[in-house]
Image (spheres, rainbow, N blue to C red):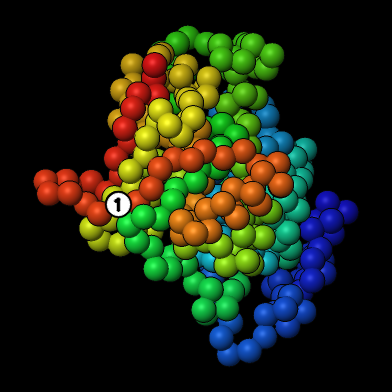
Amino acid sequence: PTVKATRRPGCDADLGGFGGLFDLDAAGYTGADTILVGATDGVGTKLRVAQIAGVHDFVGIDLVAMCVNDLIVAGAEPLFFLDYYATGALQVSEAAKVVAGIAEGCKQSNCGLIGGETAEMPSMYEPGDYDLAGFAVGAMKRADTLPKDVSAGDVLLGLPSSGVHSNGFSLVRKVVEKAGVAYDAPAPFDPSKPLGEALLTPTKIYVRTVMPLLKRGLLKAMAHITGGGFPENLPRVLPPGVVADVDVATSGWTLPPVFRWLASEGGLAQDELLRTFNSGIGFVLVVAPENAAAVRAALNEAGEDFYNLGALREMRDGEEHQVVVRGNLLL
């Protein structure tokens, strides 16, 4: 029932065959100009926190999010998903929670779960350990491929993250160890939850927010803020000689409590924080100035918070980096 709940046009979400089937025509993608887009990812060392805390309900959502958020950056609509679950000895209750999370992520992204693999490999994993990998496929028309015509003057809008998402957890675990806080103790930045559960808040999936904007042709580019943060992800969609100029003071961007705690306990400067974590912004939209009002109105109508981060400009003499963040998030 969990998997069948992910049915969408193009797939029936029945598992058990040697391969998963998907009908592109039924999904509305016909003709020679249809392009498939693939994305694969994992959850990284966030899994270690899940295993220590004994909370396995959310990492499946993370797995889907890390793949489908990358797909939509290219302009594609996510269509189907497959997962790989590897462990030394299968713990059925844990695996069921993980798969339920994957199915929930697929529902949030309107993506059919059409297959997967569960591998038991004795001696390859310590007791209680498991690893996850996911693979998503989306489609779009060739003319809709992004980024498109990105240039100086374009507006930057930031969509909030739900938390740490799924990057930087090797550093997170070091900070937790240094702070001497147990994962089952109240989170210092949110005492209403145990630390482990608070850190495991699932990665936000941006598909339902972004797809209506894509279908209206209102976006020129997007960036999924993952490992490497702003400095490494925004330049991936910028042409040479163009800088993303972000003004903290005017944007209203504030550092969420979890990042403020990590910075304080870990002794992290702002540059290191921005290079490692999403720092409260998980997704960035690049919009032509003439479309900015329409995008803001659509986000408001959908109940989606956003930040007016700044704009793109031409690189100045002596500048080397394509992302400039002006202001202090740590104040």
Q: Position of residue 125 (x, y in %)?
A: 54, 41
The answer to whether residue 252 is left or right of residue 86 is: left
Residue at (47, 25) in percent of width and height: 255
Residue at (45, 11) in percent of width and height: 179
Residue 74 vertical placement versus 304 (above, below): below
Q: Nearer the viewer, residue 289 or 127?
A: 289
Which residue bears the numbered disc 1? 313
Mark 1 crowdedness (10 Å alpha carbons): few <14, some 14-19, many ≥20: some
Q: Nearer the viewer, residue 144 or 26?
A: 144
Residue type, numbered disc 1 = Arg
Residue 299 vertical placement versus 30 (above, below): above
* Picture mark count: 1
Q: Nearer the viewer, residue 299 or 201?
A: 299
The answer to whether residue 118 is left or right of residue 149 is: right
Residue 254 in view, yes or no: yes
Q: Residue furthest left?
A: 318
Residue 17 vertical placement versus 167 (above, below): below
Q: Quadrant of the N terminus?
A: bottom right
Q: Position of residue 152 (x, y in %)?
A: 32, 57
Residue at (83, 51) in percent of width and height: 2
The answer to whether residue 209 is left or right of residue 103 is: left
Q: Position of residue 183 (x, y in %)?
A: 59, 17
Q: Quadrant of the C terminus?
A: top left
Residue 166 in view, yes or no: no
Q: Nearer the viewer, residue 149 or 144?
A: 149
The answer to whether residue 252 is left or right of residue 119 is: left
